[in-house]
Image: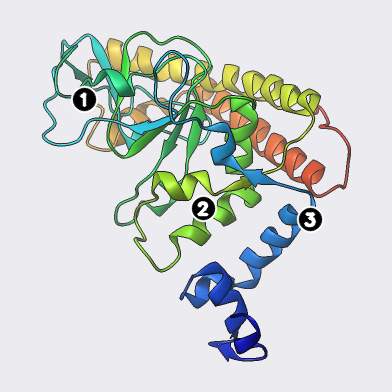
Amino acid sequence: MTQRFQGETWDGVEMGDIVVRNRMNSGYYEDQFMEVERLLTGIGAVPLGNFIPDKHLDGSLGITYGQVGARKLSPRGAVRYLQVINIRDTGIDFAIKPDRVAEGSHNDPERSRVQKGDILFTNNAFRDTNTLLGRCVVVFQDWGKLNISQHIDRIRVLGINAFYVCVFLKSRFGQRQIERVMHGVDSTGISFGRIRVIVIPELAKGIQSDVEKQYLAMSEFHERGMSIKEQLLRETKTQPGRYGEEINALAEKKPGYNRAMREAKDRLDHLVAQLEAVIEGKQKALEPFPA
């Protein structure tokens, strides 16, 4: 079949590639995507789905999303309820939209309950919120009863470090793959199947552990900022605003909040850059965050 189209192109793309990949979308073959594919193929990257079992030994699903259908919030509910806007670059922001649902209700399915070690991945974006698509965080501590909306995937990996997976997805190697499978088709969402085919290098366990250590150090500063914001929410009894505008404005007047969040962002940027350098073969290990 490939021989038949040898030398023929469509919109600048080799027809042989289109036949083999079954992707009639020229954007799929843009240089930025092909460059990442060549590099990752060259170092033996494997599908992320290799590490996401259909079911774990405890019966939990390897990947799932939250409740579907009518949303009924319960201000005094026992279960915290995360939506896309709660997932920030450096971690979870409970104050920006502090919603709760009733335990055991339609909005609290057991299959999507969140626990320590889970990856939360935003699978959808809305108008003017494209930067929220493909965000991910690792649940690094037990926040009690916690569930998610249908626009967040809960991913539970096996045989690979969850912190490494999350930071890889934040890197340009992960983001380009997410953008690629989104390109031109179903542009506001990403399916389980498309997440599973994202490829990831099987880096040495020591490097994966170093990623985890630096992520946890970054998270300490994120949590300092969140503590200040949540304290303001309690003390001022202000409404956070539809998109957290009011509580964000209050928090940004606090130097301690700004310092903590800036430090968290700087540490995350450093970690992503270090991981990219290792994947590219420019260095063999992660360098620590500069004092």
Q: CA distance from mark 3 to mark 1?
A: 52 Å
Other residues around mark 1 within 10 Å, as few (<14) / some (14–19) / many (≥20):
some
From the image, state whether disc 3 or disc 1 is nearer to you.
3
Closer to us: 122 or 289 = 122
Residue 108: percent from the left, percent from the top? Answer: 22, 20
Q: Which residue is mark 3?
A: 42
Q: CA distance from mark 2 to mark 3?
A: 19 Å
The structure residue drawn at horizontal position 37% and vertical position 65%, both measured from the top left corner, is 185
From the image, state whether disc 1 or disc 2 is nearer to you.
2
The structure residue drawn at horizontal position 70% and vertical position 19%, both measured from the top left corner, is 213
The structure residue drawn at horizontal position 54% and vertical position 27%, both measured from the top left corner, is 157
Q: Which residue is mark 1?
A: 239
Residue 14: percent from the left, percent from the top? Answer: 62, 83
> Which amino acid type is shown beneath numbered disc 2?
Ile
Q: Secondary structure at mark 1?
A: loop
- Name above or below for residue 85 compared with residue 229: below
Q: Which residue is mark 2?
A: 178
Other residues around mark 2 within 10 Å, as few (<14) / some (14–19) / many (≥20):
many
- First in residue order: circle 2 vs circle 3: 3
Other residues around mark 3 within 10 Å, as few (<14) / some (14–19) / many (≥20):
few
Q: Hey, which quadrant is residue 166 in on the image?
A: top right
- First in residue order: circle 1 vs circle 2: 2
Instruction: Give left or right: position of 135 versus 74.
Output: right
Q: CA distance from mark 1 to mark 2?
A: 35 Å
Instruction: Give left or right: position of 44 versus 73.
Output: right
Specify the quadrant that holds the N terminus: bottom right
> Which amino acid type is shown beneath numbered disc 3?
Gly
- Name above or below for residue 179 compared with residue 259: below
